Amino acid sequence: MRSAPGSPSVEWRIEPGLVDYEAGVAFMEERVAAIAEGRAAELVWLVEHPPLYTAGTSADPSDLVEPDLFPVHQTGRGGQYTYHGPGQRVAYVMLDLDRRGKDVRAFVAALERWIIGALAAFNVRGETREDRVGVWVRRPDKGDGAEDKIAAIGIRVRRWVTFHGISLNVEPDLSHFAGIVPCGIRGHGVTSLVDLGLPVTMEDADTALKAGFIEVFGACGPWAG
């Protein structure tokens, strides 16, 4: 039997080192099953991966520009191609929507608010676009109307438990994004907190993410908004 709303608290785990992608997915699969069966608490798992590309369920093969640059992993999350690598904080979010409202759209909107709130801690204004997934920042220094993507979202839901999640660019090698068309979106760039001129460490980003998560989702129970 699953826990009643509001209990137990969401576990927050920061993994040291670089996590193998397939091992990470296997861990999530096991944890999702345990949450669905009431054997484990919800979890936010913060990781970094070695350089790699992932292909979501909507990935267009033509968006894989350099297929031999890094390993490419097929994954069951929504979305298209994305990059993961050192300097990027990946937050795998395993929450039980059975007790949080069974509303996937509201969950995705909550993830967006979470990222935007975390960015605000560094005086960065993150924005969303109806026709483009992820979180964006305006780049007037690059020209009128220029925007770069700073965070990506890609989720999967099984038995009303979420997994996969978000990725926030803290200080990755932005040249690594050149091997794909990130999320299938052309005509826009990719940025990071450090690329924006902010001396943000991964520890700083984690602190902001945790505070922002509690603000949106609460330490436990349904999210606000």
Image (cartoon, rainbow, N blue to C red):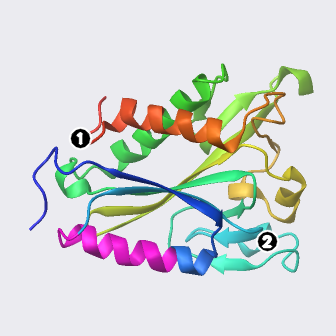
* Picture disc at residue 62: 2
* Rendered location of residue 73, percent (x, y): 66, 78
**If the image is split into quadrants, where does the C terminus sit?**
top left
The quadrant holding residue 43 is: bottom left
**Relative to 36, does residue 154 appear above or below in the rendering?**
above
Is residue 98 left or right of 157 when viewed as pictured? left
Q: Nearer the viewer, residue 58 or 123?
A: 123
Dominant SS type (magenta): helix
**If the image is split into quadrants, where does the N terminus sit?**
bottom left
Instruction: Report the residue at 68% width, 66% height from top.
Output: 49
Q: Nearer the viewer, residue 152 or 184?
A: 152
Q: Is residue 132 visible?
A: no
The quadrant holding residue 79 is: bottom right
Task: Estimate the spatial distance between the alpha carbons at disc 2 and disc 1, rounded to whole Å.
Answer: 40 Å
Is residue 81 left or right of 76 when viewed as pictured? right
Q: Which residue is tagged 1?
A: 222
* Rendered location of residue 91, percent (x, y): 53, 53
SS state under label 2: helix
Circle nearer the viewer, 2 or 1? 1
